[in-house]
Image (tube, rainbow, N blue to C red):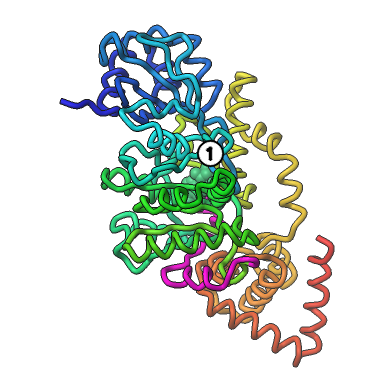
Amino acid sequence: MLKDCHTVWANCLRVIQAAIGEQSFRTWFLPIAPVALQNNVLIIQVPSTYFYEFLEEHYVEELKRAIHQELGPDGRLEYSIVVDQGNSQNQPRTLNLPTTRKATGPAPVATPAAALATGPMSSSARNVAAAAAAPPQAMLRNPFEASKAVDRHYLHSQLNGSYTFENYIEGDCNRLSRSAGLAVANKPGTTSFNPLMIYGGVGLGKTHLVQAIGNHIKASNSDKFVLYVSAEKFTNQFIESLRANAVQDFANFYLLVDILILDDVQFLSGKDKTQEMFFHIFNHLHQAGKQIVMTSDRPPRDLVGLEDRLLSRFKWGLTADLQSPDFETRMAIIQNKMQQDGIDIPPQVVEYLAHSVNTNVRELEGVLISLVAQSSLNRREIDLEMAKQALRHIIEEVEAEVNIDFIQKTCAEYFSVPLDLLKAKTRKKEVVTARQVAMYFAKEHTSHSLKSIGHHFGGRDHSTVIHSVQTVSDLIDSDKSFRGQIVELRKKFAGK
Ligand code: ADP
Ligand code: MG
């Protein structure tokens, strides 16, 4: 029976777990993902170069023994290393390295780019697989040569398995995008969400969501070739294919894809030739019923420098946005992250973080990571004091700007009504006035959507907010003393 990499790795893990401590096992082995098993070479993906070095330094014997037991004396091990976690512009990059200590068996493949390609493929097929797996600079001369001949099972999806729907917290901010993504993941190419375009600001979870779609499809349709590629990498590969006189091969390679995920399409702005190539690939795939998923950091109408014919294609499917998460969603994201990483943080600290870091999820995660690092460096439990210290510079910025809490507090004081009544059902005249004025200033001074403002006022809907803003505007025009009050109040927010 043919073994697959997951079974082999699961068996290796059992051998290793029996040999080392539970804590070390969880730290150093659970984050590893098996990538491929080719020609008796098991390829495992590790999160960083440091990780790779540590394993090689401390656990090579255990690894060696496990591989030996599973794959026999010819079995070998190779690492696929995430050398760059990526950011909004760049997807994570990986590099393939053989074990330096030679687990067992013959010498490993020499060039990193060829490391994935040890299977029974033709050399040109190997090049294609390697090009798909390796960073652009490591691409071989004609990476897409004879791509039609490639067995798709050898192609690397470039997905990061840690991005899943399970750990993608749902909130008002992402409900439509998430459920559209799930629909596409369950029925790629057959829903009306084709293409699916997700847009939203930096760090709001675009890459996570589209990767989750890819991972979900891959898990349930192993015969489908899912490919995740950033628009930047797509562009670089295209330029490389121009240089190598292999444009046709480049196109042929992309036509093999069943689910194409193109991240950060705004990168294609102003790159006419690359756009043209993408346009052709898009049309072919779409006509063939293949699924296309894209992300952008702005809505399609604001994508300056993208050809109209391409933009019009985006409208064929569904465009959905991601908003900044609200307080409750931020709490849930932190709690989920803590659970995932086995971190323990007191509830009041979690609340403090969720309250203070309201920019984007990446920043929230960054703060959590730095807290955990500080706590382990200083051998001190994470407490409120430490969190405040860590957040000093960020909080100053947050406090310097007018937020809804400040507006509510100021208006409640000014009209002498209890703060909590602004969020309650009370319809007393003075409370209603204070509430409407606070909504008016929230609209004027913050970037919250009408829906979000309503949410901060005891879960009122956006039409109530529109009505309040209108009422206040009308009163400013018709009532002189009211106008005076607004002028006074506005001074309290000005310059903040
Ligand atoms: P973008 O591509 O929009 O810049 P990312 O997808 O890279 O953002 O997200 C930044 C970080 O925030 C990632 O680590 C991601 O896992 C995390 N993240 C974003 N949204 C969520 C969410 N709803 N639930 C859990 N984690 C999230
Ligand atoms: Mg991104």
Q: Nearer the viewer, residue 332 or 348?
A: 332
Is 170 situated above or below 477? above
Which residues are drawn in magenta? 304-330
Q: Secondary structure at mark 1?
A: loop
Q: Is residue 61 above or below residue 320?
A: above
Looking at the picture, does residue 40 appear above or below residue 436? above
Q: Position of residue 69 (x, y in %)?
A: 26, 11
Quickly name the residue at label 1: 92
In this rendered view, identify the residue nearer to me: 308 or 470: 308
Position of residue 444 in the picture relative to residue 369 (left or right): right
Q: Residue 450: percent from the left, percent from the top?
A: 58, 72
Q: Is residue 17 visible?
A: no
Amino acid bearing label 1:
Pro
Please state if 234 lies on the left or on the right of 151 as rendered.
right
> Residue at the spot x=39%, y=10% of the render?
103
Residue 434 seen: yes
Question: Which quarter of the rendered picture does the C terminus lie within?
Answer: bottom right
* Residue placed most toward the observer, 352 or 97: 97
In this view, the residue farthest toward the front is 245
